[in-house]
Amino acid sequence: MLYKIILFAPLIGALIAGLFGRRIGDKAAQVVTTALLLLSGILSWIAFVKIGYGHETAEINLFRWMDVGDFQANWALKIDTLTGIMLVVVTTVSALVHVYSWGYMKDDPGKARFFSYLSYFTFAMLVLVTSNNFIQMFFGWEGVGVASYLLIGFWYKKPSANAAAIKAFVTNRVGDVGLALGIMTIYLVFGSVNFDTVFAHVHDKQDLVLPFLGMEFGAIELIAGLLFIGAMGKSAQFILHVWLPDAMEGPTPVSALIHAATMVTAGVFLVCRAAPIYEAAPVVSGLVTMIGAFTAFFAATIGLVQNDIKRVIAFSTCSQLGYMFFAAGVGAYDAAMFHLFTHAFFKALLFLCAGSVIVALHHEQDMRKMGGIYKFVPATYILMIIGTLALTGVGIPAIGNFSGIGFAGFYSKDAIIEAAYAAGAGGNNAPAVFAFWAGLIAAGMTSFYSWRLIFMTFHGKFRGEQEELKHVHESPRNMVVPLILLGVGAVLAGVFFYGQFLGDHKTEFWGHGLPGGEHGAEAGGHHDFPIWVLWAPFVVTVLGLILAWFMYIRNNGTEKRIAAQANNGGGIFYKFLLNKWYIDELYEATLVRGARKLGDIFWKIGDIKIIDGFGPNGFAAVSMAVGKKLSKFQSGYLYHYAFVMLLGVAGLVALVSMKAVG
Amino acid sequence: MFKGVPILSIITFIPALAAVFLMMMSHLARPEGKIQIEKNAPRVALVTTLAVLGLTLLLVFGFDTTTSDYQFLEEFAWLGGGIKYRMGVDGISVLFILLTAFLTPLCIISSAKSVKSRMLEYMVAFLILETLMIGVFCALDMVLFYVFFEGVLLPMFIIIGVWGGKDKVYAAYKFFLYTLLGSVLMLAAMLWLYYYSGQVLGAGNATTNIAELSKLDISAVPQVFLWLAFFASFAVKMPMWPVHTWLPDAHVQAPTAGSVILAGILLKLGGYGFIRFSIPMFPDASLYFAPYVFWLSIIGIIYTSLVAYRQTDMKKLIAYSSVAHMGFVTMGIFALNMQGMQGAIFQMISHGIVSGALFFAVGVIYERMHTREIAFYGGIVKYMPMYAAVFMLFTMANVGLPGTSGFVGEILTMVGAYQVNPWIAFGAAFGMILSAVYALHLYREVIFGEVQNDKLEGMKDMTVREIVIMAPLVIMTIILGVYPSLITDITAVSVDALLAGVNAKLAGG
């Protein structure tokens, strides 16, 4: 019952706000959805304690969904530690975002619709994480995609928002196709799509080889690879990352909830959920490591030079997701999940703080027009610094018996970097070595762009219209309170839960929820690593801070000079980063235009010229030329038709009566 | 239930009787009375079609899902020489009857408002159309099937030809030309089958009983030719690429309800034909040709999806998307396994509901603005929020979102095809991406954005009539998406038996 309430409360809220929003009014829609989510959120923490500390697990069957031949899937809930973590992350952030939106969306005419979408999103996300089979997970998977589409395009009058919404949906669909094919392969190999059945038989199928698209693959590797394509789409990994920055067209609470804390982590969740498969697929795990590590690096480079405050954070999200993937890739699923958990708090915090800044500046998002506003928005400023400290993973690494202490990101990110080091230390895991260095460099860049954001936004001189400065104000209480709660999470989530996720209590905490714990163990014991590995993240983080301080406080204007140079044809590297490695342009030139071109060719040449030209039109032309006398041809077709038909029947009857059969 | 009652004939012919009644009344009445009758014609038609729906529901409740035998059998002497009037349903056909009975009243409700001339004749045409459609699915005799199958086109021609748009003649001509070729070949094949049954079963025992014919063992070479002849007819009806170009034109010219029936029921005749004739009667040929059908399906899915994306007319866009969705059906049928076949049937039912709804949705704004140009619209969510929500749901169902009926058919047919050839499932999955491209493109251009066109000012949201039409479609789309067993439980045993028969024949041959 507990779990059912957690799951269905948001759906009920969404339905009430969506169907009756105009009848009951915005206020009521807002209250109902928020209250139901708070309920769901509180119950989730109770559930989390029961699962994580009381070792409760459950399978709850609701009713039949697909049942065709052996292809069977029920609507059902699977409750284990993995699910429990996701429950608290999703419902907590969602509830706080609901509250925050009271202030943020105060003057928006579509409030009921907004809250309905938010709650619907939460429901779909909960279905995704509670599913006990792949097909139901796919329901949640695509459901969150739709919610994301609706919310990115929430301001539907803006053409850019509409374009971004479609881009997000279609790019995700590319990933979803991979996931769908992965699920089909699972069914083909295991004859089932239920998690437990599939995972229990992974070892039996270890040596099975399948032909796929003209090549031979190990069945398990193939499945892992296809599922990962889905994960890449949803979690905006390199190649399929292009939608995430554009998704910032949506209202900022949406960016915090969907495009930072929850939906984009679904890919990581998928890989962790399917850990038994990835454990048996070393090649694809290597690929996961490579792509994750490269994305961590690649997105961070772009984040260095972006000027839109939300886009900086978006690329940061992309980069942090990369960390989670390479953690999973090297087998440290627990570290990946821990980073997912802590990241949800501090990234949601950063986004909502950015939202607070944006509201204070009347919907200005360009950091070049900000600066020096920390005096006017002190709470936002302090909380954003906390978020930055958490994101950059500030903390004092372990020395001797002292096990280190720091902000949330310190525990999880360092654990990931160390896990990559440990996996690569054996000497036969090249992707892990790559991941270690990429992760380390990206950590330095993370520090740089995060502090650059702080300095450009809050410090120096105000660079917007002076008139505007007079109206800058701190956000109302209903926006600041969620920020404070997330701030508490950003500070304490690491130190408080480290013991459960990675430390001394991890065995009891995970139970059977996460196989491959033996790999994760390497991330747990800090003491086995060389000192330089423990301190390296700390050093690059400080370096990033110093460089940012140097460029934006001490020598403010450095970037402007580079940008000016870029406008004069120089600064190729800067332009390359500013334009996001030109990947959007590449896709536009090939895929988008290609689809349009092909569509036109098929339509105007294929259908009209060739098929119709040689088919009906050609036939008409010929028959017209042959017999102009048939002037009634075009209007007489009906009778011809009836005539031919009757002729047919008459023919049959004639056959019968003549006994021609004998 | 219905012991001794020829329930299928009753359901089939009630609409035709009502049509005759209407015509006679109009013929006999004086001029003033004629106007009165014309005015009341939609009411008569509605009551009739609702009665049919009620009886069909009873039929479905009385249907035994545990047996694959034909049920509610009727057999009367008809043309002699083994050609009898045979009616009966199994788990496959009973659902199509329900779909027909479900969509027709909605068409009547819609047309009662949208048709501006010759209301009486229009209603008569629709009632006769319903009789013929239901007849196709009830017929268990090849000749009876043929009469219904070809006869269905006549009222459709008339509906397009009389109440259609300005290029209706060209559209009807194209439609006619394509179908003519197919039906001539099919007729020849049927004659051959009849002749052959006489040879096998002995003189005088020649039969046109579909069930009997399905038991015949036909050697490989004639199977190939027969299969091709039937294929010519069914592929056009589906329609499969490259014989699909009649469909967009026919849709554009047809009145709203005509499009609904065209997409909702007539396109299913091809798929039904494959399941009823091609697969059980010519299994070796079906197996032999399956790869070709797969490739045609995949080309169709990708090709027509891309073409749909470039359309400027809403109906054409949806018509092309129908061709793409029918590609999933042919792919599923020829996978020759449970998931593929059941998925194909599910996809047909679902597409009947979803595409029907989409054509109704186009009709809603067409009635207000009298154009289907996509570029004319934009931003109408401002005036029609409820319409926008409904349209969104069907757009998502069209895209195959899980939780809507559109998903179930797509995933099942792909699962079916994957077991045979992963390439095919891969190609079809590609269609999943493209469907999102064109469907969301349409939605954005029509519903979202700023209102650019002054003429859209103050467009009224859906009327009560339109809500009454849309509500059942919305409900069915979601119910079937969440609980597809409503359909798959009914089809399961029949499909299982069908496939078992096919496999037995394949093993024996």
Image (spheres, rainbow, N blue to C red):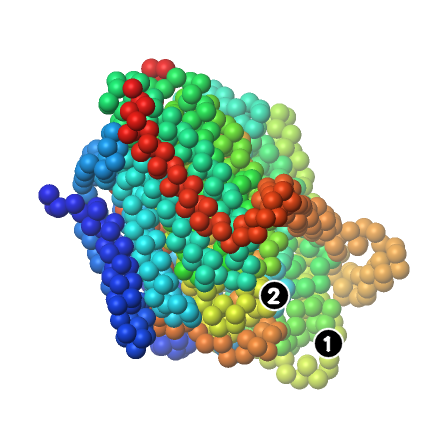
Which of the labelled discs sits on residue A464, or is there none?
1
Q: Is B384 placed left or right of A538 in the picture?
A: left
Q: Nearer the viewer, residue B11 or A119?
A: B11
Question: Which residue corresponds to the image point at 73% horizontal and 68% vertical from the top-left?
Answer: A368
Left or right of B370 in this view: A204: left
Which residue is at the front of the view, B118 or B493?
A: B118
x, y percent for residue A97: 47, 65
Regarding residue A370, the answer to whether it shows in the image is yes
User: Which of the numbered marks, if any, corresponds to residue B375?
Assistant: 2
* Relative side of A542 to B206, left or right: right
Foreground residue, A551 or B498?
B498
Circle 2 sits in a helix, a strand or a loop, which is it? Answer: helix
What residue sits 52% from the left and 24% below the top? A211
Image vertical order of residue A64 relative to residue B210, above or below: below
Residue B391: image location, x then y, percent: 45, 62
The quadrant of the rendering that contains the C terminus of chain A is: top left
| Residue at figure coordinates x 68%, y 64% from the top left | A308
Single out the residue that lies furthest toward the front. Answer: A629
